[in-house]
Image: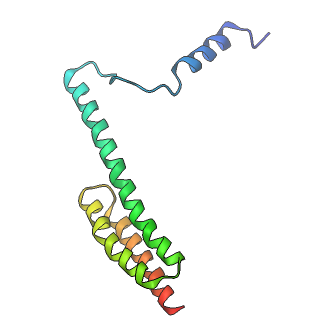
């Protein structure tokens, strides 16, 4: 049968053995490459927490807008502005993305005031 051929069995075993298992050590052999892999992992975790903070502050503004509370939305927006700008300075997001978020949030707050 086709399913019992050695090639198919070998491919299935390789898929089972090497898919989605976390790496505990970097695969590099050179000392500087190992160090770089450790640094990259630390930086990745730090950037992940900063990106989460960025998203949280944006969600606070959106929740206030959804609640139709203009004063809370303005307060949340004022708190979010330095966080968004800080993410740009740290290289977490691009400056155009920050400008886009600030512009859209501000427009939603203005629409809330007019409604």
Judged left or right of residue 44, residue 18 is: right
Q: Position of residue 68 (x, y in %)?
A: 52, 82
The residue lying toward the viewer, choosing from 15 and 57, is: 57
Quarter the N terminus occupies: top right
Q: Residue at x 40, y 77 (%)?
A: 103
Q: Looking at the rendering, which quadrant does residue 104 occupy?
A: bottom left
Q: Position of residue 5 (x, y in %)?
A: 71, 8
Where 22 sits versus 80, above or below? above
Q: Position of residue 115 (x, y in %)?
A: 54, 91
Judged left or right of residue 32, residue 80 is: right
Q: Residue at x 24, y 27 (%)?
A: 33
Furthest-left residue in view? Answer: 32
Judged left or right of residue 108, residue 82 is: left
Q: Looking at the rendering, which quadrant does residue 54 occupy?
A: bottom left
Furthest-bottom residue in view? Answer: 114
Where 1 sits versus 84, above or below? above
Where 35 sits versus 79, above or below? above
């Amino acid at each position: 049968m086709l399913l019992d051929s050695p090639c198919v069995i070998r491919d299935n075993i390789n898929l089972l053995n090497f898919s989605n298992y976390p790496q505990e050590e970097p695969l590099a052999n050179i000392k500087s490459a190992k160090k770089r892999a450790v640094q990259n992992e630390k930086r990745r975790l730090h950037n992940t927490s900063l990106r989460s903070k960025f998203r949280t502050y944006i969600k606070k503004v959106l929740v206030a807008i959804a609640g139709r509370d203009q004063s809370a939305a303005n307060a949340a927006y004022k708190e979010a502005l330095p966080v968004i700008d800080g993410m740009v300075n740290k290289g977490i997001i691009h400056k155009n993305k920050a400008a886009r978020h600030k512009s859209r949030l501000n427009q939603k707050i203005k629409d809330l005031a007019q409604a």
